[in-house]
Amino acid sequence: MERIFIKDLHDHIGKEVTIAGWVDVRRDHGKLTFLDIRDGSGIVQSVALPSHPETQKAASALRAEWVIEMKGMANKRPEKMVNPNIPTGDIEIEALEISVIAKADEIPFDKDASDLGIEAYLDHMPFTLRRAKSRAFARVQAVIVSTFRQFLMERGFTEIQAPKITGSDAEGGAGVFEVNYFDRPAYLATSPQLYKQIMVGALERVFAIGNIYRAELHSTTRHLNEYTSLDLEFGFIKDHEDIMRLEEEFLRVLVLQLKEKCAHDFLTWGAEIPEVPEKIPRFTLREAQQKIAEIGGAECIGEPDLEPAHERMLCAYTKKHMGSDFVFVTHYPVSKRPFYTYEDEEHPGFTKSFDMLFRGLEVTTGGQRIHDYDKLVANIKKWGLDPKKFSFYLEAFKYGMPPEGGLAIGLERLTARLLGAENVRETTLFPRDMNRIDLPLATQKQETKK
Amino acid sequence: MERIFIKDLHDHIGKEVTIAGWVDVRRDHGKLTFLDIRDGSGIVQSVALPSHPETQKAASALRAEWVIEMKGMANKRPEKMVNPNIPTGDIEIEALEISVIAKADEIPFDKDASDLGIEAYLDHMPFTLRRAKSRAFARVQAVIVSTFRQFLMERGFTEIQAPKITGSDAEGGAGVFEVNYFDRPAYLATSPQLYKQIMVGALERVFAIGNIYRAELHSTTRHLNEYTSLDLEFGFIKDHEDIMRLEEEFLRVLVLQLKEKCAHDFLTWGAEIPEVPEKIPRFTLREAQQKIAEIGGAECIGEPDLEPAHERMLCAYTKKHMGSDFVFVTHYPVSKRPFYTYEDEEHPGFTKSFDMLFRGLEVTTGGQRIHDYDKLVANIKKWGLDPKKFSFYLEAFKYGMPPEGGLAIGLERLTARLLGAENVRETTLFPRDMNRIDLPLATQKQETKK
């Protein structure tokens, strides 16, 4: 009999089925042996009854994480026994035959324990990624990525593969990792920025999904040294508002997709899928600082950027008074943005740039870029950089570029804030930080500060 | 009036429209000025007539790559004037108003010239990626990527973001790039192999799309030092045949998608979309060598792998005699495959592995993996590697793993063979090789050998 996926069991109620997967948990209740069986598509409870003594004997020999195949009857559970927390909580498989595909060592701890510490979680990811919360975040992340793509493809964007090895750390700013490139120095890209801009000249609307690298000596709950950036860039914009509107629209579609595909994953995290208001609140940086000052953060006034604490205050305010989990902050000062950022002619000294904050954390940065070749060259010089190092990039602007802009969303951060993860590492597959690549780096570990 | 995309012009025949884009070419024919206008969605011919003297004056001032907005009448072209090579070849815009959005420097050469050398092409990619062939390959590549995803999502696969920074060059083999990771050595991943296998334990069926890195001192028409790998891995397989069948099915879907979405892009390259036979021919390595020997490549007999020339001979044979552009070669010897490759019990010394060759080039590598913990540890030792360096990876197998396997497709190579590009750099956005990162690396350049 062909094996079916657990998620498809609803189509087989009252029938004999074959499933295959991992023993998630075994529970013995007197003469009954309960097994939660997990496959890539879901998890379902099964029971071995005394009426099938051989099967029950086989069931009671099973241990967590053993891989098995089970033939059984897919029965509807009585209404009061339904587990609403999983999609197949209304089904129980009555085990008829069990065969062991692969055994497992005794597990080191209960992977789903609510008090599992982050270090133990990270040290044992090949095991702990099997827990319900991990599988849930991985699914949510995959839905974010596929929605981002689908949304943009429907709007005429073409996906590009941006290179990650770059020839110079020309942009300066954020720390870069150096690569030994055939005995010459090369660098890991801190963003696909310059390449996606170049591609606007060829394809007008592009997006890129990939890893980016920041060699920052941070060890916080919100920083990673390697993370996934959802990037888009497009031409023929009026200004940064066009980009913000596109993100609003994307978030609306994303929320619908999450409701449709990930309701149980949010249940697993005890998290709520946000609503996206018709218009996400917008503040200029100066307006935001005024607001933050009113609610007790006066020290932010006049600063060129918001501190994390101020971002949280602003989000708390917009949530409470404007009913929005999301807020745009625009018009960061020229000095705090990269050389390619477009200065607002109507607000000299401030840029047509924005960040989007979500539940207290910056998850998007975007803005209009300078598309005029001469202005761009002048700005590179003004930033103390060398236009010669940008000659490749600049060619895109030399040969005709419309007004353009784009944004970048941090995938792991967005996932973390959606699911209410305290630490972005909890929603990252194999996080890299200054202390860890898979396992802790050999030497002295530093304290993780929030 | 709202700007419309050029690809949507068919919905506006006989109406006034506004388009925006780049002047691809200007041609003056007596009193008529023809402009090919290009946007992200397509290209269309427009004409400025003497009956609109101001518009014609504006048109004749335009130069290649200037960015403009044009208001005009979307007219159907007479049957005999239709250009079948572009989707909007049956339309001509009669220009009514032209406004310049951005000017451009004089272009350095005709980007679409058929004799454009590869070095000039690569040196000026921000400009040359605008040519018809470049936009065509980028679209084809995006369709390959989106088809791969959609195909796998429909079959219960979850997309993962695999890390690219790894802690050790544990696997040995192909050269790795070293990264200065906070003054410790780290390495760029040569594949997501170990991580996708780990994820089988959590999600059963996964795929990953991303850059991978080979620090190989090759400078050929088929090697890149950074390229995009389409990876998948799944559990509960019977053997490598399950994986090959999945790839067959994928290729069939891909070909349908290419026919639907990229017919004109193949025209641009003068390339033919391949047909996928019901069953792609399969040879064991030894059978393939026998066949190659029969057609003049006897020196391959007994070798552990096929040379590129032999791969081309085998493909020529299957094309001519079996009507297939694709061919699987299975059962490479244990010695030529990585430590995790599954040895075929029925053919000791040979593995349940395969390559897929397409039009003369290897574009896929795959196979069943060892899923038994003890066997895996034993093999690591046999390969002269240190199991301690694999302790993280091995945990996935310690805690229960079903028979599993997967494959990796080289995106740029597949694109190149589909479109008949001589050099894989022609179908790569921003190729990196030992001589070039965007621009040629400063010092002595080596000869490119085929």
Image: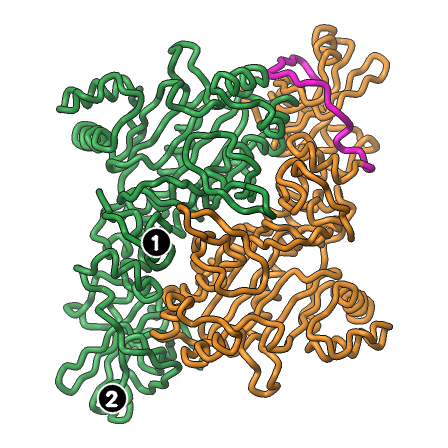
Chain colours: A green, B orange
Expressed as whole percent of the image width and height from the top left, the position of residue B96 reads: 67, 13
The range drawn in magenta is B95-115
Residue that mark 1 sits on: A436
Chain hosting mark 2: A
Front residue (pair B127, B61): B127
> Which amino acid type is shown beneath numbered disc 2?
Gln
How many badges with numbers are in the image? 2
Mark 1: secondary structure: strand
Residue A41 appears in the figure: no
Magenta-drawn stretch contains A372: no
- Between the residue at mark 1 and the residue at mark 2, the CA separation in whole angstroms equals 44 Å
Is B339 located above or below residue B185 in the figure? below
Expressed as whole percent of the image width and height from the top left, the position of residue B218 reads: 69, 54
Mark 1 surroundings: few (<14), some (14-19) or many (≥20) residues within 10 A: some
Same chain shared by disc 1 and disc 2 = yes
Is B7 located above or below residue B285 in the figure? above
> Which amino acid type is shown beneath numbered disc 1?
Arg
Which tag, 1 or 2, sits closer to the chain's start? 2
